[in-house]
Image (cartoon, rainbow, N blue to C red):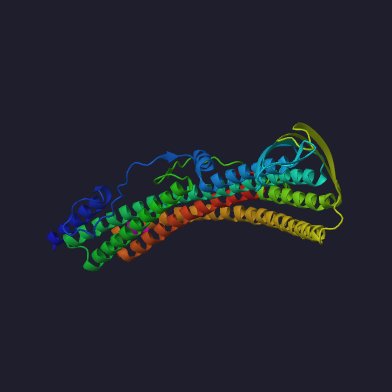
Amino acid sequence: MPDRVRFSAWASAWALATFLFSAPGAAQTSAPATEAQAPTVPSMPRITLGQAIQRALAQNSSIVVALEEIRRAEALVREARAASLPALTGNGVYTHQGIDENRSIGGRVILARDQLQANVTLSVPLIVPQKWAQWSHASTAVSATRAAGEEVKRQTAVAVARAFLTVISQKHVVDVNEHALKTAKAHFDYAHTRFLGGVGNRVDDVRAEQQVAANQSQLETSYSALARAREALGILLSDSGPIDAVEEIALPAAPTLATALDESTSRRADVVTGKRRLDAAEEVKKDSYADYLPFLMGNVQGYYQTPEGFTPQLGWLAQLVLTVPFYDGGLRYGLGAERESLAVEARSQYESILRQARSDVRVAFESVKHAEAALASAVGAARLARSALELANVAYRAGATTNLEVIDAERAAHAADTAAAVAEDQAGQARIDLLAASGRFP
C-alpha cells in the first residue's frame, strides 16, 4: 500500500508539472486531433484607418463614377451656355441647273447654269431669357451633383471604416480562439498524463481531447472569417489583394445629442444634397415665366456669289429677328406642371432626409451608450470567466471535481472572451455610425 501511495503522489506531481510547464504542442502518446495552423498567406499591406479612407476616396469605383458625373454636369453647363453666346458659321453652296446656258435679262444673269455661293454668318443672341434660364439651371445642377458626390464619399468612407473594424474584430476573435486552444491543450496534457499515471480516468481524457478538437474547429473558422474580412477591405480600396488593418484607430470625439442633431441638418452630405436638389427644382419652377417671353437675335452675314445676278457678287447684310411665342400647342403649360411636380417631390424627399438624419442620430446615440455599457460588462464577464476557469483547474488538480467542470469553465471563458471581442467591434461600429449620422465622419 505505501508503494501505491508513493506512485500516486509521483503521478500527480508529474501531471501538475506537465500542465504548468509543458508546451501546449508537446509530443504525446495519444495526441489530440490535428492542431490548427495559422494560414500561410503572402505578405499583405497593413494600413491605418486614415490611409484606408484616403485610398478608397481616390480609387473606389463609386468615387470614380461620382467624379465623372460631376464632369458630365459641368459639360452640360457648357452645352447650355453655348445657346446664349454668339455663333459663327460658314456655308458654301454649289448649284447646277439642267439648262444649256445662263438665262439673263439686260445683261444680268437671272438663272445660272452653274452657280457658287458662300457666306459667313454671325448670330448673336441679344435677348434670350429662355436660354439664360437653362444656363442658370445647368449651373445649379452642377452644385447638386457635387453635393451628391460628397454623399458617395461619405457612404464609401463609412463602408471602409466598417470593413476596417471588422478586420480588427476578426483578428481579436482569432486571438481568443488561439488562446482557448492553448488552454484546452494544456488541460488535455494534464488529464492525459494523469490517465497514463493511473490516477486519472479515460472519461476525463476523452472529454479533454474532444474539447481540443472543438477549439481547433472554431479556430479554423475564425481564420476563414479573417481572410474574408481582409479581402472585403481590399475590394473597397480597389486593391488587387487583401488588406490588413493596423489596430491603432483614432476616431473624432463623439458629439453630444443636441450638437449631433443640429449638425446633422447642416453637415451631412445627403442632407446638403437634398437641399440643393430642392433649390434647383424651385429655381426651375420659378423661371417657367421665361418660356412666355419673346427673344431677340441679331444676325450679320457676309456673302459671295458667282455669277453676279440682281445682288452684288460680294456683300454683307444685317438682321434683327424678334420672335414672340404666341401659341405652342400647350408645351409651356405642360412644362410648368412638370416642374411644379418635381419641386413638390424634391421638397418631400428633402423633408424625408431630414427626418431620417435626426432618427439616425438618435438611434446612433442610444447605440453608442448601450454598446459601451455592453462592452464594459462583457470585459468584466470575461475577466470573471477566466477567474472561474482558474478555480476549476485548482479544484480539479486537488481531486475535488471531475474535469467536466473544467471543460464547462473553458467553454464559458471562451464564449466570454469572444463576446468581449464582438462587443468591442459593436462599440466601434456604433461610434462610427454616430459620427457619420452627425456629419463628422469622414
Counting from the top left corner in percent of width and height, residue 293 is at 86, 49
Q: Main secondary structure of the magenta part?
A: helix
Residues in magenta, as a range: 391-395
Above-or-below relation of 192 to 82: below
| Residue at 58% from the left image edge and 49% from the top image edge | 155
Extreme residue toward the top, this view: 314
Counting from the top left corner in percent of width and height, residue 77 is at 69, 42
* Residue 390 visible, this orientation: no
Q: What number of labels is visible?
A: 0
| Residue at 32% from the left image edge and 55% from the top image edge | 181
In this view, the residue in front, 204 or 155, is 155
- Using residue 45 as the reference point, say whether residue 214 is left or right of it: left
| Residue at 37% from the left image edge and 64% from the top image edge | 408
Extreme residue toward the bottom, this view: 203
- Using residue 59 as the reference point, say whether residue 39 is left or right of it: left
The quadrant of the rendering that contains the C terminus is top right
Please tell me whether residue 285 belongs to the stretch shown in magenta.
Answer: no
Counting from the top left corner in percent of width and height, residue 329 is at 81, 61
- Using residue 429 as the reference point, say whether residue 46 is left or right of it: left
Counting from the top left corner in percent of width and height, residue 361 is at 67, 53
In this view, the residue in front, 83 or 76, is 83
In this view, the residue in front, 114 or 413, is 114
* Residue 186 visible, this orientation: yes
The quadrant of the rendering that contains the N terminus is bottom left
